[in-house]
Image (spheres, rainbow, N blue to C red):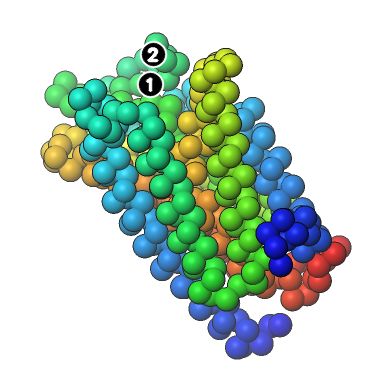
């Protein structure tokens, strides 16, 4: 079949479930445009992340690190410093995980014909798991910055990012595992 | 539908897809390290400082992950309709992204538009699209057996 013909019949090849999924995906994509830059959400997430990470650092090292005040820099990025007199790390807007929480929850919610309670449970579990992973990530990065600075970038950009995406993938697979489409 | 062989088949599909996801992510990290080391430095004397080359590299990344995702769906013998959708939606997203970039360059730009554009680019230049589409394909190729097309 010619490409143009195939394109024109694309809609008829979609099942109702697929069409609903794609419509929901488009809506989630547009919603992301509206909610991505809500500063209150970023403030909330960064503040909580900084507090919980410093508690985590204290838990491992016995010393509570100092927290700076939340600031907004010239390009609109919110950041806070965690550290002691020798080492500090900066938690900024990209580190707060808002994007991956949204992606995780949105991908769960866009599947049609799965019960709302299941969606709510899995998206909450996914977000909480990723949040605590992020807290551990910040704490671990602090120790890397302090004791193994050469490894900091590798763990920051590679290892922890990979771990978070693996967690998200596992949550999605568990969510869909053995789940039949219930045709309504 | 719930027979042992069917469940084994789906488990096999998920395992193979996980392995594919792992390798595509390793490839992304390798490309990303090159991106950070050479392109993001934006040395004006370097050839990589040129906008068109950075654009070409970005498109290379998008379609490398896209083609790998397509080949995975092909190899796993999913319905051709899924492969077709995969390419059509990827291309539409890419065209939308390019149009947005052109619009920002020649019409007007706002911080929120810049944020949206950079987030779109970030999603498209990672294997996230291929992985999400892969899950969509596995799920609907399984559920389609109890729901026929319109």
Residue beneath the point at 36% across and 51% down: B28
Q: Is residue A127 above or below residue B117?
A: below
> Circle 1 marks a residue in which chain?
A
Other-residue count near label 1 (Cα within 10 Å), few / some / many at <14 / 14–19 / ≥20: many
Near-viewer residue (B133 or A60): B133
Q: Position of residue A142 (x, y in %)?
A: 24, 35
Is the residue B115 above or below the residue B59 in the image? Answer: above
Query: Which of the pair B35/B136 is nearer the observer?
Result: B35
Q: Return the x and y of residue B49 as percentages of the image width and height.
A: 29, 28
Looking at the rendering, in which quadrant would you find the N terminus of chain B? bottom right
For residue B87, above or below residue B12: above
Mark 1 or 2: the one toward you = 2
Q: Residue at x 58, y 23 (%)?
A: B103
Assess whether mark 2 and mark 1 are in contact (beta carbons under 8 angstroms).
Answer: yes
Q: Chain of mark 2?
A: A
Q: Indicate the secondary structure of the residue bearing disc 2.
A: loop
Question: Which residue is identified by label 1?
Answer: A79
**In the image: residue B7, left or right of residue A18:** left
- Asked if residue A81 can be seen in this view, the reply is yes
Q: Quadrant of the C terminus of chain B?
A: bottom right
Say the numbered circle drawn on residue B88.
none
Label 1 secondary element:
strand
Q: Is residue A104 left or right of residue B145?
A: left
Give the residue pinned by disc 2. Answer: A73
């Amino acid at each position: 079949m010619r490409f143009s013909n195939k394109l024109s019949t694309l809609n008829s090849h979609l099942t109702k479930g697929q069409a609903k999924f794609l419509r929901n995906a488009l809506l989630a994509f547009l919603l992301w445009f509206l909610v991505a830059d809500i500063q209150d959400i970023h403030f909330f997430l960064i503040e909580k992340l900084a507090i919980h990470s410093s508690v985590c650092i204290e838990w491992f090292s016995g010393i509570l690190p100092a927290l700076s005040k939340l600031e907004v820099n010239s390009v609109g990025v919110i950041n806070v410093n965690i550290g002691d007199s020798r080492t500090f790390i900066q938690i900024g807007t990209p580190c707060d995980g808002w994007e991956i929480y949204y992606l995780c929850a949105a991908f769960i919610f866009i599947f049609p014909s799965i019960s709302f309670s299941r969606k709510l449970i899995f998206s909450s579990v996914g977000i909480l798991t990723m949040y605590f992973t992020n807290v551990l990530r910040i704490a671990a990065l602090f120790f890397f910055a302090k004791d193994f600075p050469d490894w900091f970038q590798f763990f920051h950009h590679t290892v922890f990012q990979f771990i978070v995406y693996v967690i998200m993938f596992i949550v999605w697979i568990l969510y869909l595992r053995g789940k039949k489409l219930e045709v309504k | 539908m719930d027979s042992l062989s069917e469940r084994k088949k789906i488990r096999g599909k998920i395992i193979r897809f996980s392995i594919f996801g792992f390798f595509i992510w390793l490839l992304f990290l390798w490309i990303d390290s090159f991106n950070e080391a050479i392109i993001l430095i934006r040395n004006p004397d370097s050839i990589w400082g040129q906008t068109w080359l950075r654009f070409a590299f970005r498109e290379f990344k998008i379609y490398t992950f896209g083609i790998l995702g397509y080949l995975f769906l092909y190899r796993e013998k999913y319905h051709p309709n899924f492969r077709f959708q995969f390419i059509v939606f990827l291309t539409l997203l890419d065209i939308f992204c390019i149009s947005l970039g052109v619009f920002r360059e020649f019409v007007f730009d706002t911080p929120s538009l810049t944020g949206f554009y950079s987030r779109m680019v970030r999603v498209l230049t990672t294997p996230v699209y291929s992985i999400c589409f892969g899950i969509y394909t596995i799920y609907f190729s399984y559920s389609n057996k109890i729901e026929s097309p319109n």
